[in-house]
Image (cartoon, grey):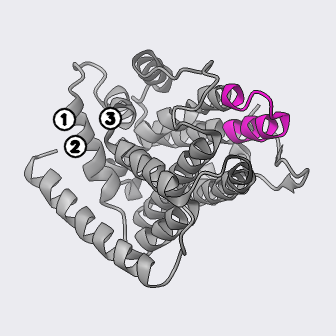
């Protein structure tokens, strides 16, 4: 099901890659980074769970069939990301049991798919949060692509990063429509964005890391949050942060470039370096 081309809400056909598009025969075991393998495994679980997020968005936007269609297409692409990452992770580590790990993950992290109201307080807030998520994932996979030496992983990350940037534009377009109806100002949008950013240290990512890499152990939230973040943050460079900051500023209604971007990017860079050093000292 994930191999079909997906269309956006405007009726345009988006040229989309398939699992068969990936040059699997170029896989080079000698260029594998074991640390990247760990976060790829975790990412495969989160991405593969896209169907539940699609169902959640369908419930929140229950009277907007156009958006529901776009959300369904989006969720199929997210699932495909998970399948591509899982296939690569299995090549890198044949002992990786994706099905078992995915069951552990979904048993431990539940998404309320039937909610009729956004947990962000409004549909505009939900779309701001979705923009922030796509900001994070597009920069995350861009950073992973630049950090990876293994050619197949680089190609997968290139495709996923491009998809996530396109997803950001999709949600941003719908955000503009709902802002016109709901009149949600920049201050409220800022706090929604800030709240979603802080959720990068929530249980979902930590539990995915645990489920993928430590199946025989008990879950310790603080331990696995640290383990995931140290590896996830390590690949980021200035250019990844700068682009992510610009996308986040745009989502909350502020100018995406210029002095504000430079200040926020500088602060984010210093915080990231501090956090990585802190996690390293903690032995994460």
The picture places residue 45, in percent across and down from the top left corner, at 48, 32
| Residue with the most extreme bottom position | 258
Q: In the rendering, at what x and y percent does residue 250 appear?
A: 57, 66
- Membership of 253 in magenta stretch: no
Task: Provide residue 138's location: percent of width, then percent of height.
Answer: 54, 58
The range drawn in magenta is: 58-76
Q: Is residue 27 visible?
A: no
47 over 272 or under it: above or below: above
Kindly indicate the quadrant of the structure image that contains residue 267. Answer: bottom left
Disc 1 or 3, which lies upstream in sequence? 3
CB-based contact (under 8 Å), mark 1 and mark 2: yes
Between the residue at mark 3 and the residue at mark 2, the CA separation in whole angstroms equals 8 Å
Residue at the far left in the pictured view: 281
Query: Which residue is pictured at 69% across the width and 25% down the height?
Result: 59
Residue at 68% x, 42% y is: 77
Q: Is residue 219 left or right of residue 179?
A: left
Mark number displayed over residue 206: 3
Residue of label 1? 223
Q: Which residue is mark 2?
A: 226
- Residue at 81% in and 36% down: 69
Left or right position of 170 against 28: right
Disc 1 to disc 3, C-alpha distance:
8 Å
In the rendering, at what x and y percent does residue 160 appear?
A: 60, 53
Magenta span contains residue 61: yes
């Amino acid at each position: 099901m994930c191999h079909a081309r997906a269309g956006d809400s405007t009726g345009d056909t988006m040229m989309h890659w398939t699992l068969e598009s990936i040059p699997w025969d170029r896989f080079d075991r000698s260029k594998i980074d074991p640390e990247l393998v760990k976060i790829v495994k975790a990412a495969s679980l989160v991405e593969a769970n896209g169907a539940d997020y699609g169902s959640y968005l369908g419930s929140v936007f229950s009277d907007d069939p156009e958006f529901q269609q776009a959300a369904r297409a989006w969720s199929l692409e997210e699932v495909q990301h998970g399948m591509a990452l899982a296939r690569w992770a299995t090549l890198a580590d044949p002992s990786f049991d994706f099905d078992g790990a995915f069951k552990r993950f979904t048993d431990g992290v539940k998404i309320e798919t039937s909610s009729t109201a956004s947990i962000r307080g409004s549909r505009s807030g939900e779309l701001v949060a979705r923009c922030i998520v796509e900001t994070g994932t597009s920069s995350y996979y861009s950073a992973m692509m630049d950090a990876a030496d293994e050619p197949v992983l680089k190609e997968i990350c290139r495709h996923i990063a491009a998809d996530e940037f396109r997803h950001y534009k999709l949600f941003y377009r719908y955000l503009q429509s709902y802002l016109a109806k709901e009149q949600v100002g920049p201050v409220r949008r800022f706090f929604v964005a800030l709240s979603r950013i802080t959720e990068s240290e929530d249980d979902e990512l930590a539990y995915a890391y645990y489920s993928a890499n430590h199946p025989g152990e008990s879950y310790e939230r603080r331990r696995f949050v640290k383990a995931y973040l140290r590896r996830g943050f390590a690949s980021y460079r200035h250019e990844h942060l700068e682009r992510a900051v610009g996308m986040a500023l745009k989502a909350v209604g502020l100018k995406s470039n210029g002095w504000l971007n430079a200040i926020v990017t500088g602060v984010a860079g210093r915080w990231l370096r501090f956090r990585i050093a802190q996690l390293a000292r903690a032995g994460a």
